[in-house]
Amino acid sequence: MSSIPNFRETADKDPAEYYEELRRFGDVVWDAEMGAWLVPSYTACKYVLLNEETHFARGAAPGATAEAYEQVQGRRHISLISGKDHQRVHLWWLHAMSPKQTEEWRISVVRPVINEAIDRFINTGKADLSRDFAGRVTINVIAAILGLPWRDDEWMAECQTHLNAIQLFLDTYLFHFDDSITDRAINSQRAMNGLLKPFIDSRRSGTGSDLISMFWRDGPSMLADWDENDMFVGVRVAFFAGTETTKNAISNALYLLLTNHELLETIKRSDDKERANFVEEALRLYGSIHFRTRMASIEAELGGQSIHPGDVVVTLNIAANRDPQRYAEPHVVDLKRRVPKDHLAFNLGPRTCPGAGLARVELQESVSIILSRLGGLRLAAEGQPPVFHGFKHRGYSPLDVVFATGGPDGHAP
């Protein structure tokens, strides 16, 4: 049999063909270049994610990498705590991002932010929907629910610069540790804390309805000795959980529409249920986070392989979402799938993404409002072709498009 392909070589590419080739080697495959077990099987991924509390630990690799991760993220970051502490923090996030709350934000935050982003370019007849739309919408939504100055372009741009430096570290630290990237991330974490401090200090009473006030009000019930450092960590968690990942998810959903005219026309005519199902299919096929990294804490049998304590296990969630053993016609957008939310785009188990509801609302509203306001929408013939950028986090960009300047029928909307 031919040698196992190197997963790292899929960076900045659509890895769909790689996932299919990898599947020929089994449900759990050793990648010597990465020093990790790769898991493309839905069943095996699900087993790892559901049993992480007892079998597969969450966190960075040992040594300098783990120390740097803690420095960048914070000692009590949700990804580093476990047991009862994690359960309390995760439950708080689920409550804060409840279906009722996200539906309120749909009206009060998401729609205004989306329309404000479109207003900036609608009269030009062209835009990069990844940069000018998805990138602006997602960070502004999170800033708005935190009660931060999302309409202050200069403040938001500085915040985005620091987020980018930290995101680069998070994307590379485990398989390509680089001191310079780490140093920039640590410096950006400190600078971002400086940007946030005035807002965090002013909300200490915990009487507001924004997320920062909620942190102050509820934090002591989550973690003992709750303090300002926990506030910084909590706010950064909100930014990272809801900015880059959702930006990529929106970009990927729009890419699917822009590269499939028949699908685009179908979604234009569809009702809310069909559009919601389209969002789930986009998440299944092109979810933002392609893999999750775990470390085995005990001897385990997984997909016919013996896993030893300390082994790195990488669940290829998006590969699992295309597993033919799980899905009929896995590479096809099927708006009639029986259980459309049956995918791993938001993870599974004790670390399921609590912001999934908000991300879905942003995706649904982005698709609906884009299609209602931008008539004749299509990729620009003279634009740069979209590329699937990234490794762990992947998103299509640029999305250079042209459209009618007067709304869907050529007249002012």
Image: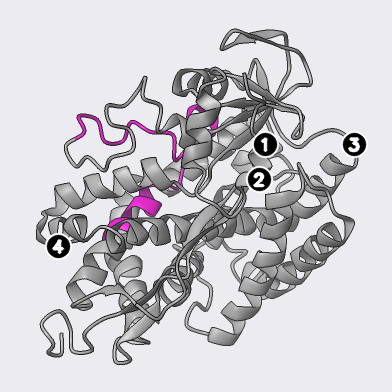
| SS assignment at label 1 | loop
| SS assignment at label 4 | helix
Q: Do the residues under discs 1 and 2 have CB atoms within 8 angstroms?
A: yes
Q: Give the residue at x 53% y 45%.
A: 289
Question: Closer to the camera: disc 3 or disc 4?
Answer: 4
Q: Give the residue at x 73% y 17%.
A: 297
Rounded to the nearest whole Å, what is the CA distance between mark 1 and mark 2?
Answer: 6 Å
Query: Dot 2 corresponds to which residue?
Result: 9
Q: Position of residue 207 (x, y in %)?
A: 50, 62
Disc on res. 268 = 4
Going from N to C along the chain, the mark reached first, 3 or 4, is 3
Amino acid type, mark 2: Glu
Going from N to C along the chain, the mark reached first, 2 or 3, is 2
Q: Quadrant of residue 250?
A: bottom left
* Label 1 crowd bin: few (<14), some (14–19), many (20+), radius 10 Å: few
Residue interval drawn in magenta: 337-365
Q: Is residue 93 above or below residue 44?
A: below
Q: Do the residues under discs 2 and 3 have CB atoms within 8 angstroms?
A: no
Rounded to the nearest whole Å, what is the CA distance between mark 2 and mark 3?
Answer: 26 Å
Rounded to the nearest whole Å, what is the CA distance between mark 1 and mark 4?
Answer: 40 Å
Amino acid type, mark 3: Gly
Q: Position of residue 74 (x, y in %)?
A: 76, 50
Whether residue 91 is visible, yes or no, is: no
Q: Is residue 60 above or below residue 244?
A: above
Q: Is residue 119 above or below residue 323?
A: below
Query: Dot 1 corresponds to which residue?
Result: 6
Q: Give the residue at x 18% y 78%.
A: 375
Query: Dot 3 corresponds to which residue?
Result: 63
- Name the foreground residue: 104 vs 362: 362
